[in-house]
Image: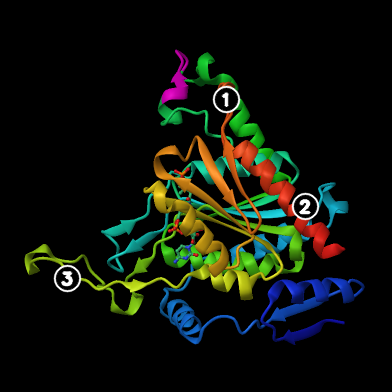
Amino acid sequence: KAMKIIFRARNVDETLKFFSTYFRTVLAMDVVVDADQLPETTKNEVISFFESAPPLKGVAEIEKSLKEFVDRNASSSVNGRANRVVCVTSGGTTVPLEKLCVRYIDNFSSGHRGAASTEYFLKVGYSVVFLYRRGTCQPFCSSLPDDPLLDCFSVSNDSNIEVDALHAEIVKRAITENRAAVAEGILLKLPFTTIFEYLQILQLISVSLRDLGPSAIFFLAAAVSDFYVPWESMNLHKIQSASGPLDMRLAQVPKMLSVLRNEWAPMAFHISFKLETDKHILLAKADMALKKYKMHMVIANELSTRKEEVIVVTEHEKVTVRRDSIRAGAEVERPLVELVVDRHSAYVKKLDA
Ligand code: PMT
């Protein structure tokens, strides 16, 4: 029998501990932690954001693929993995300026952080939902040249297409490892372009992963727009330059971290990122995000050094994680993911105790 519990509380962690202690024997539980923690204004902003968003295309297929993914990964007996799942978000969201979009505002992110982290999570036994911006870096492809199609292949005399010897190993690895992970059902890739698609799909993912409770991680490396043009006030056609300078008012995108943490997936382990260009304000901003959004971890990075080091900020510590500069090709994401996995395991253990 399914049981629906609506519980009002100020402290989400205590509530979760209560549930995991007393309800471990319940077979199916749909817990709605109505934490009453979101200010009324945030709730209204969130509602109006989703109500005004254009309908998401392919919802039924996305829901179906998420269901299959969760069914496959919810129990370690199915695929021999430890039922640990992470949602990695990657790349920047766009903000369209016209409904029939010609122009848009973009957020910086190559998607390298998300793609590389996905590979390391897969390596250590996690299954990954990879929510990525179309056209950005993909897992297993970081060693490929910028234009793999033109740089890695040649047409031979008999018109066959061949991989150049120089790139054969990396092309083989990219194809086989990516296909194996997708075919095995441990890597689910979901693309987005706009801020609307990103947040709509993130909501679908979090609701789907909710039953996994503390076994799920949200690793939010995507660069998310802070401002947007509400759909109903957006021009249908291309904005005409003949009308003179453009004067446009952008609405604020509600900080979905609060909603994700408190309502969509309250039992999961939440990691957000803080990107700054001024290193003097970076740690203070990361600390603020940790407290304000009740994140379990905030990963602070500075634009110019983001590939060399990041600082992991939690309630109790600040750990600088560096790329191993002596090893050729070493990436900062490897030790970063190791640290995340260690702290996530401690979180799961604490809730189980
Ligand atoms: O992709 P790369 O080129 O490898 O670069 C990686 C990165 C620098 C993009 C990545 O490491 C990173 O820092 N990503 C987060 C950048 C960002 O959007 O920072 P922010 O300060 O704007 O947002 C902080 C957090 O709030 C983010 O986790 C974001 O998902 C979240 N957010 C932001 C806006 C919003 N309206 N709602 C949100 O929930």
- Closest to the camera, between mark 1 and mark 3, is 3
- Closest to the camera, between mark 2 and mark 3, is 2
Q: Distance between the residues labelled 2 and 3?
A: 50 Å
Determine whether 233 is above or below 224 in the image: below
Give the amino acid type for the residue marked by disc 1 in the picture: Ile
Residue 74 visible in rendering? no
User: Magenta residues, as a range?
Assistant: 151-158
Q: Residue at coordinates 47% horizontally, 64% vertically from top-left?
A: 197
Q: Callout 1: few (<14), some (14-19), or many (20+) C-alpha neighbours within 10 Å? A: some
* Residue with the mark numbered 1: 170
Q: Distance between the residues labelled 1 and 3?
A: 48 Å
Colour scheme: rainbow
Image location (x, y in percent) of residue 133: 46, 52
Sequence order check, earlier mark of 2 and 3: 3
Residues at marks 2 and 3 touching, judged by CB atoms closer than 8 Å: no
Give the amino acid type for the residue marked by disc 3 in the picture: Asp
Asked whether 235 or 298 is in front, the reply is 298
245 sits left or right of 265 in the view: left
Residues at marks 1 and 3 touching, judged by CB atoms closer than 8 Å: no
Question: Quick one: quadrant of the C terminus?
Answer: bottom right
- Closest to the camera, between mark 1 and mark 2, is 2
* Residue with the mark numbered 2: 345
Residue 247: which disc? 3
Image location (x, y in percent) of residue 313: 58, 53
Give the amino acid type for the residue marked by disc 2 in the picture: Ser
Tell me the element at label 3. Answer: loop
Q: Residue furthest right?
A: 25
140 sits left or right of 192 in the view: right
Asked whether 13 or 233 is in front, the reply is 13
